[in-house]
Amino acid sequence: MTTIEVNDETIRQTRELRDEFQKFLREYEFGMREVETKISILRDEFLHDHSYNPIEHVKSRLKTPDSIVEKIARKGIAEPYFEQIRQNITDIAGVRVTCSFVADVYLLFDLLTQQDDITVRAVKDYIAHPKDNGYKSLHVIIDVPVFLSTGPLLVPVEVQFRTIAMDFWASLEHKIYYKFSNQVPSHIVESLTDAAEAASELDIRMERLHREAHGVPLRQLDPPPPAPRIVQV
Ligand code: 0O2
């Protein structure tokens, strides 16, 4: 059996690393809160000025330390210093915005990413280009400034925009993969892909119904088919 000598110096270094890691995660939490505030301001403004709420719900999460370590290994980050992690793992802070309709997804995306203090690092438009399994969602990695006592800091936040139907599908698919420990029987994979198609059809029908019922309440709600937002897929 190997014995590890734990002396005062080891304890001091371990505590220092723990404190640094907590500080690192806190910065992501601040970035996430900045994005949440931006989204909630947009929602409130829409409600008051247009009597319309394009957002169904917003969910945020910080990646767990275990999940960060797993991703460091998966990405083969040889020297996992905080700066390397910040550059290579861009979804430590995540905000998911679930909208009513596809047009709202693109509208919210534009309203957030066009703000002056936001820098777009990468966009993955899985709505224009769904994954093979049928997964749809619009992902963007943005840098958002956080103003600390030490000065401003740019924090990357992953924002996922999707409709309720896409969210329902993704959440069920995620649970199924978890249940089968990623070894999903092929007939279930096929059914899931079919279900993704059904979800897309439902999105189209519901948006059409909404427009029929309400006329066209906002110019933005009736754009030509949204141009795919692609920087990187
Ligand atoms: P969690 O718990 O949601 O955070 P990356 O490794 O991030 O550089 P990747 O994995 O290609 O590159 O990123 P991508 O494609 O943008 O996907 C990242 C996130 O999108 C995932 O996060 C999921 O939230 C979601 N996602 C992507 N593909 C699928 C899919 O096929 N099904 C479902 N249900 N969700 C998907 P995490 O890290 O997997 O988990």
Image (cartoon, rainbow, N blue to C red):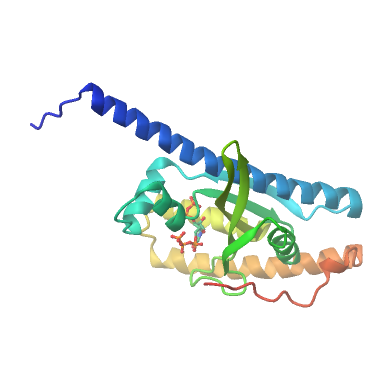
Percent coordinates x, y for residue 212 in the rendering: 88, 68
On screen, residue 101 above or below 58: below
Percent coordinates x, y for residue 228 in the rendering: 65, 75
Residue 202, image quadrant: bottom right
In this view, the residue farthest toward the front is 150
Residue 116, image quadrant: bottom right
Please name whichever residue, 65 or 195, is drawn nearer the observer in this view of the structure: 65
Percent coordinates x, y for residue 146 in the rendering: 61, 45
In this view, the residue farthest toward the left is 1
On screen, residue 98 above or below 20: below
Q: Residue at x 40, y 67 (%)?
A: 186
- The total number of labels drawn is 0
Q: Residue at x 34, y 50 (%)?
A: 80
Percent coordinates x, y for residue 135 in the rendering: 54, 65
Q: Residue at x 62, y 74 (%)?
A: 128
Q: Residue at x 24, y 26 (%)?
A: 9
Please name whichever residue, 17 or 197, is drawn nearer the observer in this view of the structure: 17
Image quadrant occupied by the N terminus: top left
In this view, the residue farthest toward the top is 8
